[in-house]
Image (cartoon, coloured by chain):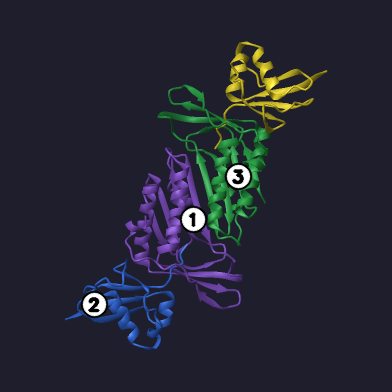
Chain colours: A blue, B yellow, C green, D purple
Amino acid sequence: MALAVRTLFFAAYRDLVRTSELPLELADGATVADLVAELRSRGGPFAHLPPDPAVAVNRVYASASQPLGEGDEVALIPPVAGG
Amino acid sequence: MALAVRTLFFAAYRDLVRTSELPLELADGATVADLVAELRSRGGPFAHLPPDPAVAVNRVYASASQPLGEGDEVALIPPVAGG
Amino acid sequence: MIRADVVRGPIDTAEVLAGVGDAGDGAALLFVGTVRNHAGGRPVDGITYDAYEAMAREVLRAIAGEAAEILGTERVAVVHRIGTLKVGEVSVAIAVSSPHRAEAYEASRYVIEEIKKRLPVWKKEHYSSGEEAWVGGAVPAPVGPADHR
Amino acid sequence: MIRADVVRGPIDTAEVLAGVGDAGDGAALLFVGTVRNHAGGRPVDGITYDAYEAMAREVLRAIAGEAAEILGTERVAVVHRIGTLKVGEVSVAIAVSSPHRAEAYEASRYVIEEIKKRLPVWKKEHYSSGEEAWVGGAVPAPVGPADHR
């Protein structure tokens, strides 16, 4: 079984990987940490993503161990600087 | 020797004694406490002034023991409620 | 640049705030005190503020100066209105501007707390019942401004 | 009555403040964040704010709701601007209104501190030298809004 998710990139991460969105297929039961590992394993600029970035799943901050679901919107969140 | 001062009344104190200003002659060396005692001894509404009100001498808050000088502007200050 | 005023007409809060602005700062804070429609459970129509005006100006200037020390900038403006105000009208506006928001909050709060403690201003509440009364407040301590810090 | 907006155009701070007003309150507080003309010792011409817009709206709404609990009233408005801003332009406005000034100060401060901690917004500084860089900030913790209290 496979799991399709949308991965979103913002600010410094978007500039790094040169895209704002990437569809990914992950193994069933994959977690946030698995997604990050999968991204980094693509090599090139993706290898420069941090190993434990802040991540939001469906617009809520998630821990690395959170399991992903079909169709989830997974955003890699660089250090924030609003205000 | 005598000492001439101006005494000012505001808000509830002015309503009480029915004047906003009163010239007073005090003995040389008189203090803030002496002035208050003198006022209260006049009787009538003046007797209802508190025995230890906040007092400003020349627009600066003063202690009861502060000596007064010729021409001082002495204000009896009811509890303040600005803002 | 420090502004400390006692005025008899309406206060333009936007103008008070604009007066402290500076392109080198990043944080500005405006406190606005207004006349409430109730006090101690009683409906209120308005308030008359009385003041020992000459002294109030001096005390307000001292408070603003002390706030500027907290703030680390001279960008402090405080305006207190006296006279008769209706419900919802602005009685006091305090604006501060600083590169540092922590100091902005601290300085702004300092000004309103010191006003309540030592500004020689009094208020008479006009109740909807037709009655009116002077409101009891704080008893100022017999010390110079510097000792208030 | 709680307002939480992410906008692309200029923020009218007076309008944000007016929106929270209430005749039953006595204290209103407006925080205004503006673009500074310097950062880390370097002259700055402007800032571009980027955002994860859908999430930013939700987080801002959550923060405003938490502030309303501190405040004890629903009279909270917070507006954050995104896009490219020049020096002196308003990036964020926070207005609160309460019968109690202590709560007003606490709630206002809460909103700006939480924005800095967890609002998914980023800024790229445009230096007068022509260079530009994303500004590093806070790493949001993986917890729900309720745990932020």
Q: In this figure, which residue is indicated by the disc labeled 3?
A: C78
What's under tag 2, amino acid-wise? Ala
Cα–Cα gap, marks 2 and 3: 59 Å
Camera-side mark, 2 or 3: 2
The residue at the point 21 percent across, 78 percent down is: A3
- Chain under callout 1: D
Q: Are marks 2 and 3 on the same chain?
A: no
Report the residue that reaches farthest toward the front: B65
Contact (Cβ within 8 Å) of mark 1 with mark 3: no
Contact (Cβ within 8 Å) of mark 1 with mark 2: no
Q: In this figure, which residue is indicated by the disc labeled 1?
A: D12
Q: In this figure, which residue is indicated by the disc labeled 2?
A: A30
Report the residue that reaches farthest toward the left: A1
Image x and y of residue A76, in percent: 36, 74
Contact (Cβ within 8 Å) of mark 2 with mark 3: no
Image x and y of residue B41, in percent: 66, 13
